[in-house]
Image: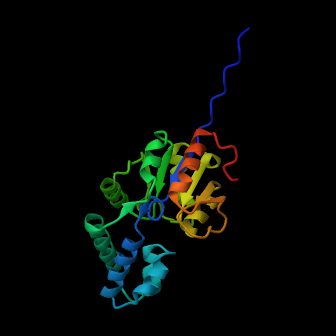
């Protein structure tokens, strides 16, 4: 009598936001936008408040409608690229161990930034790079649209129900939820609306994320 072959375990995937989730870049973002605002004689705090919830071209339309948006974007890119080269920032505690602990091919980055900057920051902080990165240039619709996370899942060959999104910002949370994925929030004092689970830090979330990919966590949304 032969026993039935074991059913293969269904692979699970993790889709990470970058800035604020894996990389501590909040002060860098504020400084870059502050310098940009000074160039145009704008209130730095107001500009940053708008920039936190919109893509750059939408920010320009709100805070500098009388300026050439292409010129605004070129100035912002110049400042951001310089920050990658000389800015001081670090990976969040636990990020390196978490990413190195994930199975190859099981995770991706979904960022509103650009891939060359992500690679520069990861290189400087010692974080590994995945095979799949969906950046601002890869999609026409940014977060909170579901498109960025859906694009990452498609490139991984993953079904939305098998994906865990790890985010720190409300717009990213909404992007993951609209894509039909499980969404966990990290690195925020208060849980964003709609998250299935909330962790105060990435380090606190790390063992649960690893358990999700291994399938040992019975209820990912618990």
Residue at the far top in the pictured view: 1
Depth check, front residue: 44 or 23 = 23
Residue 161 position (above or below residue 145): above
Image-quadrant location for residue 26: bottom left
Depth check, front residue: 172 or 140 = 172
Residue 72 position (above or below residue 190): below
- Residue 197 lies, in percent from the top left, at 64, 58
Q: At 65% across and 68% down in the image, what residue appears?
A: 193
- Residue 126 lies, in percent from the top left, at 34, 51
Q: At 62% across and 36% down in the image, what residue appears?
A: 10
Taking the image as shown, residue 127 lies to the left or right of residue 173, namely left
Depth check, front residue: 78 or 151 = 78
- Residue 16 lies, in percent from the top left, at 50, 55
Taking the image as shown, residue 67 lies to the left or right of residue 175, namely left
Image-quadrant location for residue 185: bottom right
The answer to whether residue 205 shows anywhere in this view is yes
Q: At 49% across and 47% down in the image, what residue appears?
A: 107
Residue 6 position (above or below residue 194): above
Q: State the scheme by which the image is colored.
A: rainbow
The answer to whether residue 150 shows anywhere in this view is no
Q: Quadrant of the N terminus?
A: top right
- Residue 18 lies, in percent from the top left, at 45, 60
């Amino acid at each position: 009598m032969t026993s039935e072959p074991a059913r293969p375990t269904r692979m699970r995937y993790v889709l990470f936001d970058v800035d604020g989730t894996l990389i501590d870049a909040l002060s860098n973002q504020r400084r870059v936008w502050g310098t940009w605002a000074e160039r145009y004689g704008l209130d730095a705090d107001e500009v940053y408040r708008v920039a936190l919830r919109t893509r750059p071209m939408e920010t320009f339309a709100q805070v500098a409608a009388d300026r050439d948006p292409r010129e605004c974007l070129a100035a912002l890119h110049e400042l951001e690229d310089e920050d990658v080269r000389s800015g001081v920032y670090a990976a969040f505690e636990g990020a390196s161990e978490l990413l190195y602990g994930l199975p190859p091919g099981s995770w991706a980055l979904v960022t509103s930034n650009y891939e060359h900057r992500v690679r520069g920051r990861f290189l400087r902080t010692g974080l590994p790079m995945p095979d799949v990165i969906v950046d601002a240039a890869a999609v026409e619709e940014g977060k909170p649209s579901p498109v960025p996370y859906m694009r990452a899942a498609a490139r991984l060959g993953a079904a939305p129900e098998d994906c865990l999104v790890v985010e720190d910002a409300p717009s990213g949370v909404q992007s993951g939820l609209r894509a039909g994925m499980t969404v966990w929030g990290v690195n925020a004092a208060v849980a964003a609306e709609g998250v299935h689970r909330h962790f105060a830090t990435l380090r606190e979330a790390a063992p649960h994320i690893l358990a999700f990919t291994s399938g040992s966590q019975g209820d990912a949304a618990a």
